[in-house]
């Protein structure tokens, strides 16, 4: 029975990694749509959302079934609980991709102008946080997860800088308000992606070390 249980845990992990791949792809596509202003890429993001939502429900059900049918030991119980929480964060990463695609579609109605914000660079850092957090999950590496927490401040700083620059642009050139506001919201969406990556890293630390480090990143060390 324990062998079967651990096979089921492996199946749960594999399914979560499929979910992770879909969420990462959605973010990559939404940023490519921003960079190229190719609205057909936005449609790919929109069409993928129902599959991500469906997979979230399936993973939650698998995890709940394991909790109901088994009496997992402490580390296995923490693993299942962490999967449930990581699953929710990955679904929200997908939501942020949809939000970005919506903003890109709105920007398509206006002139494509140079804005004082490096959205691709911000996206690259936020995406790197997600990848590193997931790598920590795959390898059960709490130290790698801890390193993700240290990156969150950089994403926050870039988002703050974008807010400052775009707010000033709106004041100086009101005719560019639509493009500026959409870019500002995209930067905020990416900041939220970084927050979800942080949550995932915290859940890895909880699983591996048995420590709840939410709201207190320094306690993870």
Image (cartoon, rainbow, N blue to C red):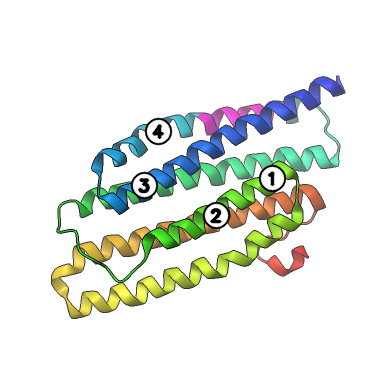
Q: Main secondary structure of the magenta part?
A: helix
Q: Determine the CA span between mark 2 and mark 4.
A: 21 Å
Q: Secondary structure at mark 4?
A: helix
Residue 48, disc: 4
Q: Secondary structure at mark 3?
A: helix
Q: Earlier in the sequence, mark 3 or mark 4?
A: 3
Q: Determine the CA span between mark 2 and mark 3.
A: 15 Å
Mark yes or no: residue 156 visible.
yes
**Counting other residues with Cα less than 10 Å from the Cα at mark 3, is it few (<14), some (14-19), or many (20 or more)?**
many
Residue 78, horizontal then vertical, whole percent: 77, 43
Give the left or right position of residue 190, taking residue 194 as reference: left
Residue 128, disc: 2
Residue 137, disc: 1
Q: Residue at x 44, y 57 (%)?
A: 123
Residue 176, horizontal then vertical, whole percent: 17, 68
Q: Earlier in the sequence, mark 1 or mark 3?
A: 3
Give the left or right position of residue 177, taking residue 54 as reference: left
Residue 213 image-quadrant placement: bottom right
């Amino acid at each position: 029975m324990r062998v079967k249980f651990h096979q089921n845990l492996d199946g749960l992990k594999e399914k979560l990694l499929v979910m992770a791949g879909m969420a990462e792809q959605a973010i990559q596509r939404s940023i490519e749509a921003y960079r190229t202003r190719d609205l057909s890429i936005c449609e790919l993001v929109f069409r993928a959302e129902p599959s991500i939502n469906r997979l979230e429900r399936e993973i939650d059900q698998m995890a709940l079934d394991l909790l109901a049918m088994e009496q997992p030991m402490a580390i296995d119980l923490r693993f299942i609980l962490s999967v449930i929480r990581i699953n929710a964060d990955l679904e929200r990463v997908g939501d942020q991709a949809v939000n970005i695609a919506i903003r890109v579609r709105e920007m398509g109605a206006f002139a494509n102008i140079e804005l004082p914000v490096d959205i691709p660079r911000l996206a690259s850092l936020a995406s790197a946080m997600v990848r590193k957090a997931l790598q920590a999950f795959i390898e059960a590496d709490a130290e790698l997860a801890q390193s993700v927490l240290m990156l969150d401040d950089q994403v926050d700083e870039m988002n703050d800088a974008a807010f400052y620059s775009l707010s000033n642009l709106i004041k100086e050139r009101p005719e560019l308000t639509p493009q500026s506001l959409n870019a500002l919201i995209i930067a905020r969406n990416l900041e939220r992606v970084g927050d979800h990556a942080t949550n995932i890293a915290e859940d890895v630390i909880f699983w591996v070390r048995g420590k709840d480090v939410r709201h207190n990143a320094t306690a993870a060390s």
